[in-house]
Structure formats: C-alpha cells, structure tokens
Image (tube, rainbow, N blue to C red):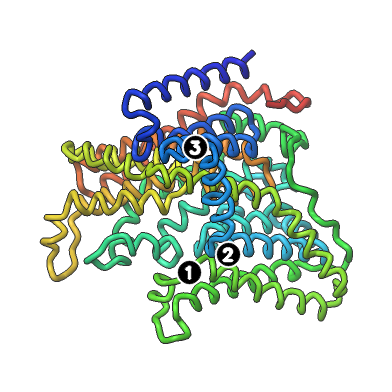
Amino acid sequence: MKKHVSKIIFAAFILVYVICCFVQAPVTDAVGTMWSLLPPIVAIGLALITKEVYSSLFVGIITGGIVCAISAGSGFPGVFNTIVKDGLVANLADESNMGILVFLVVLGIIVVLMNKAGGSRAYGDWAAKHIKTRAGASLSTFVLGVLIFVDDYFNCLTVGSVMRPVTDKHKVSRAKLAYLIDATAAPVCIIAPISSWAAAVSGTVKGVNGIQLFIRTIPYNLYALLTLAMVIFIAASDLDYGPMKTHEDNAKKGDLFTTKSTVYPEDAKPEHTKGKVIDLVLPVLVLIVMCVLGMLYTGGLFEGESFIDAFANCDACYGLALGSIGALLIIIVYFLIRRVLTFGQCMDAVPAGFKQMVPAILILTFAWTLKTITAQLEAGAFVSDLVQSATAVKILLPAILFVVALGLSFATGTSWGTFGILIPIVTEVFRGELDSVTSSGSIPATVIICISACLAGAVCGDHCSPISDTTIMASTGAQCDHVNHVSTQLPYAMTVAGVCVAGYILAGFVENVFVVLGCSMAAMLVTLFVIKKLKTPKSAAAEDETPAHE
C-alpha cells in the first residue's frame, strides 16, 4: 500500500507540474520554460519510486523527445530524431564521453586482472589483520578517497576497487560503501587546487586569476567541508538513519545488498594462490601515476607549460583514457613477469572487465542523452532567468544561489554545467565590484561567497542526482545497485544541505569566513548529535537476526 501511495503522490505532482507548465507557456514554446525540467523530473521521480533506473531514464528521454518534437514542430519523426540521432548517437560519438567509457572499460579490465592474480584477496587478508573494526574500514575508505583528489571519476572507481574487499570483510553494506566513495569524490575535488575541477572553475570567470579565485572559495564551500566532517562523524560513531540504517543492519547480519537486486557479477575468482598485496598496490599506483601524467600531457606539460597551467588546461577525459591504457599495458607486463597470470588469462580479462562495466555504460549513456535533451530545451536559461530575478535581495543571494544550483544540478545531473551557467550570472550581478578590483587582485568577499554558494549547490545536487555521472560512478565502484545508492545517500546529503542553507544566510549578513565556517561546522555537529540521540533508543531493534528488506 505504501508503494501505491508514493506512486499516486508522484502522479499527482507530475499532473500539477504539467498544468503549471501550460500556465507559463504552451508546449509549442517549451524551450527555456518550465517544460525544460519535465524530462529529468519524470526520470528522477520514477527511479526513486520504482527503484528501476534503466526504464526510468528511458521514460524521461522519451518525455524529452516528445516535448522537443512538439516545440520544434517536427512531428512524430522528430521524436526519434531527438532521441536517437541528437541523443544516443551524438553522445556515443562525443570525444569526451568516449574517453570516459574507455577509462571505465580499461579500469574494469585492470580490476579483473588484480582479482585473477590474487592481489585483491591478498590485500583483503592483509587489511583484515590491520583494520579491526567497521569504523576502521569506513575511515580507511574516507582517507583513500581524500588522497585520490585528482579527478572524481578516477576517485570513485579506484577507491571502490581497492576498498570493496575490506568493507565486505567488516560487513559494511555496499550502499554505505557507495556513499563513502561518493562523499569523498566531488566534495574533495571541489576543494583541491590541483584537480580537474579546479581547472573547470578557474575558466568560468574572466578577468581575474582563476586559481586564486578557486582557492579563496574553499573556506566558503560549506557543502564540501561539512560533508567531509559528516563522513568522519558517521564512520567513527556508527551512526546511520533513513534507508541506510536498513542496509547497514542487514549488512551486520551478512546481507550486503538488502534488495538482492545486484546488477554486477561476482568479482573474478583468484586463479593463483601466490598473489601478494603488491599485486594490488603496485597496479593502483601505476594507474594513478599514468592517469596524472596523461592529464598533464593533454595540458601541455611536455610542451613547456608549468605544472599548474598543465592541470588548468588539461583534457581530463582524454588524459584518463590515455593514462589508463598505458597503465593496462604496464600491468599486463608486470603480471607476466611475476608469472601469476599467463598471457591467455590476461586476454580473458578483457571481455570480463568490459562485462563488469556494462551496467555503468548503459546508465551513463541514458543519463548523457537525458542531459542533452534537457540542454536542447534550455533548462539552464530558464533557471538563470529565475536567479537574475532574485538578485534584488542581495543579502539572501548566497542562500538563494545555493538552493537554485542544487535544484539545477539535481535535475540536469551535471555540476560543471550548473556552475558554468550560474557563475557568469554572479559575475554580471557584481560587475561593478569586479571592475574595481585593485591591482593586487583582491576580489570582494561578497563575490567569493556567492561563487562558493554556486559551487557548493552544484556539488550537492550532483551528489544527490540519479543521473549524475559521479553518482553512477560511485555505484559502479562499490558494485551497488544504483537506485539503492541514491535512496540511501539522499537523507545524508539533505541533512548537510539544510545546514548549508543556514550557513549561507549567515554569510549574507556576516562576511567573515571564521564566523561562517565555525558556526556552520558547529551546527552540523549539533545536528548529527541530535540525530544520534534520537536514534539510540531504537538501536535494540537491530538485535533481530533476520535481515529486513526494503
């Protein structure tokens, strides 16, 4: 009955939203109106209710195709043209997207190689001796996620591959692992000066030093900093609430998945018993070094550019694909020299690795197509008009920008696209202040706070969205059902978002980083202590030995 109620509520919401769309504009004028957000709303809502991501994304794509065709007056054939030619085919032909898919497949092959060689098993045995508790396994995942700060895609897949054996041994649910991975991917990259994200942000504001601007936004990026604080608190205190508690309670009784809807095959069984920890550590280090070199190469490091400029100008997707292929060749040669795998066994890992990544490839392809259709309907222009109409209340502008960025990023599944839309609006609002920037390059605190709010909201929405690349990668890295990851992570992300809204309201009145960050951090900890206090009396229910299912 509960599921039927949620479906009825969702259907009623969609009906009301469509009526509002008609009130604003006819569907023939859908571009740049409320209609532009209908496809992602349908896809996200269906995914959260049905817990089936493939059909939900496809229904959202069809909805977008129909709206685009009616708006363009292209008729029935226009629906297929939008979905297939402009959507699926165009995205699979895109160089950046193909770079991500190549990296994904190559990483899948490397993971299979490490498993076949016994490296993952050996690392799991070693970790079991040195990591004694569930808290230790969670904190180790957090630390590794922070250390791999170069790129969020790379972070998600590498941390997941390395830590899965450890968290499995300590009965940490796959949903919890996916959250730990996701919470140390984009939130870490958005406060790391040397990362693909820093390069993206630094290029959005013209006329100022991009890297200096990015560094100054770090203390005001409340969502990233509070998320990291929350991860440490949750890992150390074993606090869980919402759907995550069900998953964690079941994991403690041996059920790591809860819903039994695992879409990933079992890891390859070790084919040799002489695998050592080095057979996992060395391939991972090789992969890290080669991927960093690949990104620096695309940024022109070997053509005379400085290290910082090379990172700022790099093509992350091409660099990751280039670096991962180079790493794969080195790793194969290493395993052959070690004689833990034969050449035939190495070649068998190629289709096996590809097979492991098929679910992620399907979800990514559908998500990219949905984003393309949303972009054709100019959802960004619609949201930017809303933001510009709210700039009259400048004291509340940081909080407004955070909420708008969160909503846009959640609906479109892209944080880069979100701050790419909103930051230029902020710079126009404060054009007078920016034009009067002194020769020392001092940017007004108000501008820094508003840009930080855009970045924080974009990361928050990206963190929550089922159609976000990073969220999909986190599910893939943890080998967790995608909808399980989204539904269990959402309450945690919204808890942080609520504190951030209060923090940015304070920032509109008090432009002091110590006051804003200090009060926000204190509010976050108080919130978590209150949640823990409220949840503690119910902990006895976990004593039942029968796993519960959603």
Q: Mark 2 highlights which residue? A: 99
Tag of residue 75? 3
Q: Nearer the viewer, mark 3 or mark 2?
A: 3
Which residue type carries mark 3? Gly
Task: Tell me whether circle 1 and circle 3 mark residues in contact (CB < 8 Å).
Answer: no
Which residue type carries mark 1? Asp
Task: Tell me whether circle 3 and circle 2 mark residues in contact (CB < 8 Å).
Answer: no
Rendered-image quadrant of the C terminus: top right
Task: Tell me whether circle 2 and circle 1 mark residues in contact (CB < 8 Å).
Answer: yes
**Mark 3: which secondary structure?**
helix
> 388 and 510: which one is in front?
388
> 25 and 289: which one is in front?
25
Residue 27 rendering spot, x and y as whole percentages: 39, 31
Which residue type carries mark 2? Gly
As measured in the structure, the alpha-carbon distance from the residue carrying label 2 to the one carrying label 1 is 10 Å
Residue 546 rendering spot, x and y as whole percentages: 78, 25
Residue 528 in view (yes/no):
no
Residue 392 rendering spot, x and y as whole percentages: 16, 38
Q: Mark 1 highlights which residue? A: 315
Residue at 36% x, 45% y: name it. 380
Residue 196 rendering spot, x and y as whole percentages: 45, 64
Earlier-in-chain disc, 1 versus 3: 3
Q: Relative to residue 265, is residue 57 depicted above or below? A: above
Residue 31 in view (yes/no):
yes
Q: Relative to residue 20, is residue 197 depicted above or below? A: below
Most extreme residue toward the top is 1
Disc 1 residue crowd, few under 14, some 14–19, many 20+, Cα 10 Å: many
> 272 and 230: which one is in front?
272
